[in-house]
Image (cartoon, helix red, strand yellow):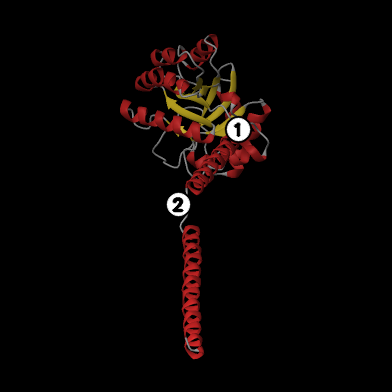
Amino acid sequence: MKKSQREIINITALVIILIIAFNISNLFNKSIKDENNLRNTQNANPTTTNEIELEVKEFEETIYDSEQYTDLIVNDLSSSEEETNFSPKVAFIIDDLGYETEVAKKMMELEFPVALSILPFLQYSEFIAEEGRKNNQEIMLHLPMEPNNSDADPGPGAIKSYMSEEESRQAVRDCILNFPYIIGVNNHMGSKITEDREIMKIILEEIREYNLFFIDSITTKDSIAYEVAQEMEIKSAVRSVFLDNENDMEYIKGQMVDVQETALREGEVIAIGHSRINTFYVLKRMVPELIKAGIEIVPVSEIVK
């Protein structure tokens, strides 16, 4: 074989070897690239068993943190309950006593405290005070005062706006001394008087002289009687609910619901009713329900401040 032919064969073989090496290199690089792409895809979309377990673990930790937070809320609520914990109290006053004895005796026999607020100078005023005391009920003077409505008669012994200062003082003293065991006073009618600061100051000075507390019956939205009593540092309070402005059992039951809701919301209630048989029946039936709701029935003297 000539020399030139051998050189051609060697060159051709070398070219073939280079081509084969180049292809092998491309295949190797492609394999590495595919593996890298696969890894990148796996990192972007975690689907391995270990990573699923990690997700579950993280979710479980979130639940645990949430449970811890709930425990904190429960603790906060417990603290809140301790800070705002109170026993709701309701005191009942029965007004307008002194005209008769039948309903009055029933009110005295109720198995919870009821203050008996008695009008002065009536046929049975002293008798009811004596009997009420025997039944361990608190006795109050239902002090008659002049109303804005000139047609309404507040009854004997009333404080009138035209009285002189001394006449007003003497009228208050006479009413206080008309029957025994009085520990407090609330106004009967009196919208004209309880709006008058000067007259109320005179009345309250006499009440303080006898060491009595005062309940503003709030017979007018413009009453300043309680405000004056507080200024004079006389133990006092205000009426929260009238039970029986309508002498209807369904109405009175509705007012008792209001008593319960107000007591649970505000802590203390003074409810005023009158010497009516319907009021007696509703009290007898519904007060045990108030007690079941966690409300304490207390003497009115426990609420005045």
Q: Which residue is mark 2?
A: 47
Let me know if residue 139 appears in the view. yes
Mark 2 vs mark 1, CA separation in Å: 76 Å
Vertical order, 136 against 221 (above or below): above
Judge from the rendering whether residue 212 lies leftward or rightward of residue 53; answer left or right: right
Residue that extends furthest to the top in the rendered view of this protein: 134
Let me know if residue 217 appears in the view. no
Give percent across and percent down for residue 48: 47, 50
Judge from the rendering whether residue 264 lies leftward or rightward of residue 151; answer left or right: right
Give percent across and percent down for residue 272: 46, 28
- Could you tell which of marks 2 and 1 lies nearer the N-terminus? 2
Give percent across and percent down for residue 288: 43, 18
Mark 2 packing: few (<14 Cα in 10 Å), some, or many (20+)?
few
Q: Which mark is residue 236?
A: 1
Describe the element under mark 2 as helix, strand or loop.
loop
Say what amino acid the circle numbered 2 marks: Thr
Look at 42% across and 33% down and name the residue there: 258
Describe the element under mark 1 as helix, strand or loop.
strand
Residue that extends furthest to the front in the rendered view of this protein: 1
Mark 1 packing: few (<14 Cα in 10 Å), some, or many (20+)?
many
Which residue is nearer to you in this view: 73 or 140?
73
Q: Nearer the viewer, mark 2 or mark 1?
A: 2
Judge from the rendering whether residue 219 lies leftward or rightward of residue 176; answer left or right: left
Say what amino acid the circle numbered 1 marks: Ser
Vertical order, 74 against 13 (above or below): above
Which residue is nearer to you in this view: 229 or 159?
229
